[in-house]
Structure formats: structure tokens, C-alpha cells
Amino acid sequence: MPEDKGWKSPYLLLTVTMLLWGSAFASSKSVVAQLPHTVAALLRFGGGAVALLAAVAVLGKSAATPDSTTTASARGGGRRAALAGVLGVFAYNGFFFWGLSLAPSLDAGIVIPVLSPVLTSAFLLVTGRESASGGRLAGLALGLAGAVVFFFGAGGSAHGGTTRLTGDLLYLLSAVCWAAYTLIGPRVLAGIDPLRATTYATCAGAVLLGALAAPDLGEVHWDGLPAGLWLNVVFLAIGPAAVANLLYYRGVGAVGPASASLMMFMVPVVNTVCSMVFLGESFGGLQALGALVLLSGAVLAVTRGRVPARPRARTAPITGKKPSEL
């Protein structure tokens, strides 16, 4: 199949995805500054659930099949996806938005997207599911060393003290949740297309986030919220929570998960620019050093010292299958 060009290029779609995800940290921080963190999480993912349900209604018909066996498999996949949403949406965002109330979004954009692949790789090596090459072990060791330096720097009194360190540790728990969510992804996607899996997971997580936010809803003065905040919430719900996922799955299906995972390292770069320019956040010297070491180790661990080969152009007709990687 000829490679897509122009706006259909998978690398362009992945770039847009990373821009949306990278900007979401600072954008979420600005919402948390005006709302309780539980309510902020509910608005983002409640809105994201609505947007994804609309996408399923419009785009999901092509994935439907009348076969009873396939239908039963899809129902089982839907239940698995909903359970996965407890971890990947509810727990992940519960820790993330709580962390935003204590620490800068600048830290979140380093800890979560960079440390998550390090934790994922470490688990796969410890359980024997993947081989331990020298480059990968070196990358993991370097990444973990960078994380230690980063968290040690976060505790410096000149740059936030124990409050910032507590927030960064909550980001670490978010990274653990996302790594676990990634590891169970193939099982969740078995028998169900990624769009529906993401929708079910987001809806299940949003319901639990609603229960968590219920005690704080009465404290919000809804009529006094500025229009800018609502525009920000709409952006978070439609952009990073819905559109980015759809673009990401298409990109992964075209270039493969290895190349797509490399592009994930655009996220901390985009977040750093957004956090510094729009929120005036900054690193201490020790944190900046830890972030660079952590990022270098993560890249080495993911690539194993090699650049993933570019997938060959397809010659067979499209079968309509969905990508099977999260």
C-alpha cells in the first residue's frame, strides 16, 4: 500500500498526538488552580467520555460484526476494558490531578511519560518476558539513577520543598498505574477494537472519578467560573482525551509501536515549553540534571541502543484490522 502523504501521514498524526498530550499537563494545572483537583479530573474525563461515545456512534459502525462468536468476544473485551479503566483512568488520574494540586505540571511532564516506559521495561525484564540486553540494562540503570536525582532535587527548599516532593511522588504513582495499564493492554484489546476499548475504559474511569468528586462539587461556584476555564476544559476533553487517542492508534497501526514509542519522548519537551512559557514554572539545577539523565536512560532502555527499522510498505490490500497495541 502506498505510504500516506500530507495530512494523512502517520508521523504527522503522531506529532499532533504528542503536541496534544504534551500541552495537557500545563492545561490541566491551570484548571486545578481554579477547581478542586477531583472536580478537574471529572470534567476532563467526563467530557472525554462523552466525546469518545460520540466517536463510537459515528466511527464505530465499521467495527461491528454480526457473528455471534465475535460479538461475545467483544462483550468480554468491553468488560475487560472497563476494568482496565479503573487502573488506567481512575487511579492514574486520581494520583495525577492530586499531584497537580501540590507540584508543578513541569514535573508531571517528566516523571509520567519518561518514567512509565522505564517501569514497563523493568517489569518485562524481571518477569522474563523480554531479554536483558546490555544496552537496555544500561538504560534502565541510567533512568532509575536520574529519577533518584530528580526526586532528591524536588525536595530542595528553594524550589518547593516537601510539598513539591509529595506531588512528584504522586506523579510516580501515576506512572506506575500507566505502566501497568500498558502491560495489560494486549489482553484488554483482544476481541475488541481500540476505539471501543478506550471508550469503555474512559467511561468506567469517569464514573469512579465522579464518585470521588461528589463531595467537592458543592464547593464550586459554578456561575462564577470564567469562560477561559470552560474553553480549557473543552480542549482537554476533546483534544488530549479523545482526538489524541484516535490519532495515536492510527499512527501505531502504520509505523508500529517501536517508532511510535520513540515519538512519546516529544511529550516532555512540549510540556516543558508550555509549563515555562504559560505558567512560569521552572526546575532547580539538580532537578534539571536528573531530568536529563532520566530522559537519556529511558531512550536507551526503549531503543536498546538501536533505532527501530522503518516498516516496509504494504503490498497487500487493507483488511480492516485494527492495531493491537495500546
Image: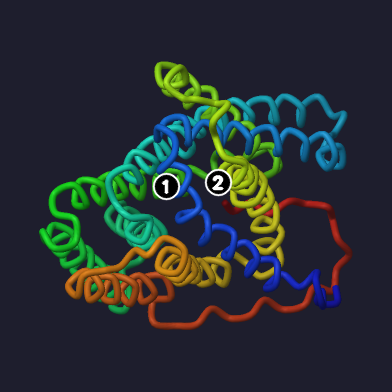
First-in-chain label (1 vs 2)? 1
* Residue 202: quarter of image: top right
The residue indicated by pointer 2 is 186
In the image, residue 30 sits, relative to residue 201, either above or below, namely below
Q: Is residue 102 shown left or right of residue 235?
A: left
Question: Percent position (x, y) of residue 277?
Answer: 45, 69
Of residue 189 and residue 22, the one placed in the foreground of this image is: 22
In the image, residue 211 sits, relative to residue 115, either above or below, namely above
Instruction: Report the Cα–Cα distance between label 1 and label 2.
Output: 14 Å
In the image, residue 204 sits, relative to residue 239, either above or below, namely above
Question: Percent position (x, y) of residue 311?
Answer: 67, 76
Q: Residue at x 69, y 29 (%)?
A: 73
Q: Residues within 10 Å of mark 1 (few under 14, many from 20)?
A: many
Of residue 177 and residue 131, the one placed in the foreground of this image is: 177
Question: Percent position (x, y) of residue 20?
Answer: 59, 59
Of residue 138 and residue 101, the one placed in the foreground of this image is: 101
Q: Residues within 10 Å of mark 2 (few under 14, many from 20)?
A: few
Q: Is residue 87 shown left or right of residue 155?
A: right
Question: Percent position (x, y) of residue 250?
Answer: 71, 59
Residue type beneath disc 1: Trp
The residue indicated by pointer 1 is 178
Q: Residue at x 39, y 41 (%)?
A: 97
